[in-house]
Image (cartoon, helix red, strand yellow):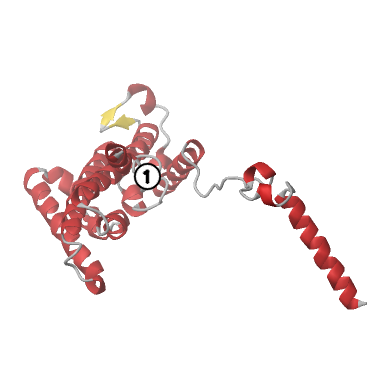
Amino acid sequence: MTSNKKLWIFLKGLIAENPVLVLVLGTCPTLAQTGSVIAALSMGIAATAVLVCSNVVISALRKIIPDTVRIPCYIVVIAGFVTVVQLLMQAYLPDLYDMMGVYLALIVVNCIILGRAEMFARKNNIIDSALDGLGMGVGFLIALLAMAVIREVLGAGTFAGIEIPFMADYKIPILTMAPGGFLVFGILIAVVNKIGPKKGEEKRKNFSCEGCPSATLCGKVSCAENTELVVNVKEEEVEDNGN
């Protein structure tokens, strides 16, 4: 049972609670960094690393951090890990660092990272928080790659900067621009909503005797009939009072 729970904590971020396509968080880097597969991959990995590390630290400190200053504390922790990622990329991957530009620093205020810290890490243990961060990070990465593949292949006729001979002659340049990003984003959200688990759906209430725990006490009269009977009685009382 415990292993199934931990597996669900990880898997829910992929589709059921995908941070981009279901929860609609982190839309700014999603639209800005999905013009190319390499940029999307870099952003996804960087955000996942920060998400996992910040979740672990915040979970470890959840009993120490006062509630009154928890949000500033979360931001300090997240900013620390973002700085580490920035320095590592600047030192060892300068081309990717320049490609990501200001959006690398903006991971600090990414709604996904701060949201998971507030909603999950501060309430759960370190292992569960790490799994949640990893699942949400991978879900974020999958969403970015899905958008980037569509936009780069169809919009630029390339994949990871490598030209695709056939697509180069039939590319749709608008997909690499902002309007194309919004278009692909909306289409993917619609697809996920169609094939994924439906949110907010409630089971249809059964007003028959089979669905009533007190059926044996009411003479096997269905709840719908009881409701209609009560309404009729109230209408008669109103008419009597009027007369």
Q: Residues within 10 Å of mark 1 (few under 14, many from 20)?
A: many
- In this view, the residue farthest toward the left is 91
Dividing the picture into quadrants, the one containing residue 112 is bottom left
Q: Position of residue 236 (x, y in %)?
A: 86, 67
User: What amino acid does circle 1 point to?
Assistant: Asn
> Does residue 101 sit above or below 190 in this rendering?
below
Q: Which residue is mark 1?
A: 18
Q: Is residue 2 left or right of residue 97?
A: right
Q: Indicate the quadrant containing the N terminus: top left, top right, bottom left or bottom right.
A: top left
- In this view, the residue farthest toward the top is 166
Q: Position of residue 81 (x, y in %)?
A: 14, 55
Please report the residue visible at 20 percent of the width from the left and 56 percent of the height from the top: 59
Q: Is residue 214 left or right of residue 234?
A: left
Dividing the picture into quadrants, the one containing residue 113 is bottom left
The tally of labels here is 1
> Does residue 190 sit above or below 75 in this rendering?
above
Give the camera-side residue of 1 and 14.
1
Q: Can residue 77 be seen from the camera position used here?
A: yes
Please report the residue visible at 11 percent of the width from the left and 43 percent of the height from the top: 93
Please report the residue visible at 29 percent of the width from the left and 60 percent of the height from the top: 118
Give the camera-side residue of 209 and 124.
209
Please report the residue visible at 31 percent of the width from the left and 51 percent of the height from the top: 29
Where disc 1 sits, the SS reads loop
Q: Position of residue 65 (x, y in %)?
A: 18, 68
